[in-house]
Amino acid sequence: MSSPRIEKPDLPERMTWEELGRLPEELARQIELRDGRVVWVRRGPREHQKFTRRLVNEIERCAREYVSTHPEHRWEVETETNVFLGPSGKSDFLTPDFLVHRCIPSYHDVRAVDTVLVGEVLSPSDTRSDIEAEKSRYAAAGIPWYWEVTLQPVVSAIATIRAYGLETGVATLPEGVRPLHRSDYRLVGEWTHADEAGISFGYPFPIDIPWGALAF
């Protein structure tokens, strides 16, 4: 997430995947579709790209280590890859900064049903309402784990990494009150540089990352 790098042209409010594909690539990569509606996404400063890349490298290392002793499991770790939220069609998708999905055939679309973890590296321009709206879409699609990475505002460094787990149960509410979303994420892990051992989390496979691997 961050602000578009080129000025928004006059586009229709709704587009198909095929229409999106006919746009110039530098423009199309700034758009997501929400049930066919055009949603402009933000691309971050160079720090955003830097720490996304380092996180992906470390998560991929952990995945490979796990698979080496558990060959029955196969994971793929990607960066900025479209995740199509429905079981078919391409009118509803998000592009997380990083993700983990089950191994699928080459050149097949990544679907939410195959995705086990998505993550966003937040930029100063991201608003809380935009972040929560995006998070609720991941939750509604049933993706089990969501990571949120906050950067230091001045120093080139990660400030906080938070891990969220999907909760699908509905709490008991007063009669006549209904939740807006039947699935939601709960904070299950949080790390800052005060945690000298680094990031340690057990799902979807053991992820252990020392802070030094994420530093410049």
Image: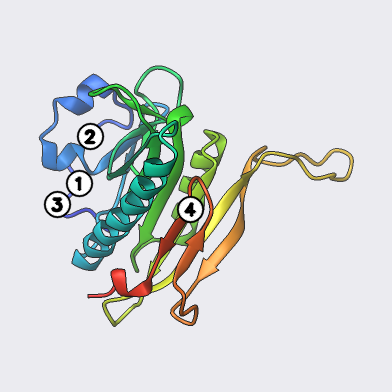
Q: How far apart in space, not on screen, are marks 2 and 1 (Cα)?
A: 8 Å
Give the secondary structure at mark 1: loop
Q: Which residue lies furthest to the right in this view?
A: 175
The x and y percentages for residue 121 are: 36, 59
The x and y percentages for residue 184 are: 62, 45
| Badge 1 density bin: few <14, some 14–19, many ≥20, Cα 10 Å | few
Whether the residues at callouts 1 and 3 have beta carbons within 8 Å, the answer is: yes
Question: Vertical placement of 123 versus 39: above or below?
Answer: below
Residue occupying image coordinates x 28% and y 39%? 81
Q: Which amino acid does label 4 sit on?
A: Pro
Q: Report the residue marked by disc 1.
A: 8
- Residue 140 visible from this viewpoint: yes
Q: Report the residue marked by disc 3.
A: 6
Q: Which residue lies furthest to the left in this view?
A: 24
Say left or right for 182 vs 192: right
| Badge 2 density bin: few <14, some 14–19, many ≥20, Cα 10 Å | few
Q: Residue furthest top?
A: 88
Q: Nearer the viewer, residue 162 or 28?
A: 162
Of callouts 1 and 4, which one flags the residue occurring earlier in the amino acid sequence? 1
Question: Vertical placement of 162 versus 83: above or below?
Answer: below
Q: How far apart in space, not on screen, are marks 3 and 2 (Cα)?
A: 14 Å
Give the secondary structure at mark 2: loop
Q: In which quarter of the image is residue 117?
A: top left
Q: What residue type is labelled 3?
A: Ile
The x and y percentages for residue 127 are: 43, 61
Q: How far apart in space, not on screen, are marks 1 and 3 (Cα)?
A: 6 Å
Q: Report the residue marked by disc 4.
A: 206
Whether the residues at callouts 3 and 2 have beta carbons within 8 Å, the answer is: no
Badge nearest the viewer, 3 or 2: 3
Q: In which quarter of the image is residue 29?
A: top left
Q: Which amino acid does label 1 sit on?
A: Lys
